[in-house]
Image: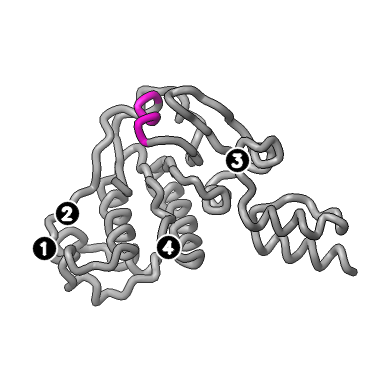
Amino acid sequence: MEIMYTNVLSNHYFETKKFLSFMGDIKDLKLLVDEIKEVNFDKSKTVKSYLPQADDYLKALGLKLTILEVKIGELASTDLKLIKLIKAILLKPKLIILNNVDIGINDRVNNRISRFIRTMNDSFNIKFLVISNNPVFLNMINRNVLIMKDGIIKYQGDLIIAIKQKIIPKPPIIKMIDLIESQKIDYTLDDKELLKAIYRSVE
């Protein structure tokens, strides 16, 4: 259940939100989203049978066009996630849910996913809900996070504030900033911003 979608958005929560970063269990989504459907494939069929005209999408996600001839059951796990994402886009639903897609994927691909879904939102006005326990990945999508547990909203707001309030465990990048706290560098979840801050601090 890595890529899901819905055409029913009865909750007004999404009216003003294009992207939602979410920490919590998939079952907690029932309070926000109705009629969730999963993207499923027949493993014996080729990618082309599901994505007959998706060359631009494949290229945008760094996939070679030769993947079209590969059978679904023979795809690497990362490639399968990306193919499911493209298929969900082609369905043009109101909301696409990415459920822990970042697990097992390197930063380069995660960056591509982030750019890709922003482009798809601009092009088709599809909203995205991204579930992850990785604040660095969520930060690529949207700095505002909704944290739920057992159907109860525990926190809603900025990721950095959630980390400072110990609602979210400190990721490695924040622990690194703590080690160089004598330089008074502000918390960030973006490695490029951290490098800039370090450079400014030693000028």
At x 55% / y 37%, what residue is drawn? 145
> Residue at horizontal 40%, vertical 27%?
32
Identify the image quadrant of residue 169. Answer: top right
Question: What amino acid type is highlighted by mark number 3?
Answer: Ile
Q: State the separation of the CA atoms marked 2 and 4.
A: 21 Å
The residue that label 1 is drawn on is: 45
Element at label 2? loop
Q: Which residues are magenta?
A: 26-31
Q: Which image quarter: residue 190?
A: bottom right
- Residue at label 2? 41
Q: Is residue 63 left or right of residue 157?
A: left
Real-space Cα separation, disc 1 to disc 2, in angstroms: 8 Å
29 magenta-colored: yes
Query: Which part of the image, by quadrant, shows the C terminus?
Result: bottom right
Circle nearer the viewer, 2 or 3: 3
Q: Earlier in the sequence, mark 1 or mark 4?
A: 1
Q: Amino acid at mark 2?
A: Phe
The reply to whether discs 1 and 2 touch (Cβ–Cβ < 8 Å) is yes
Residue kind at label 4, given as amino acid type: Ile
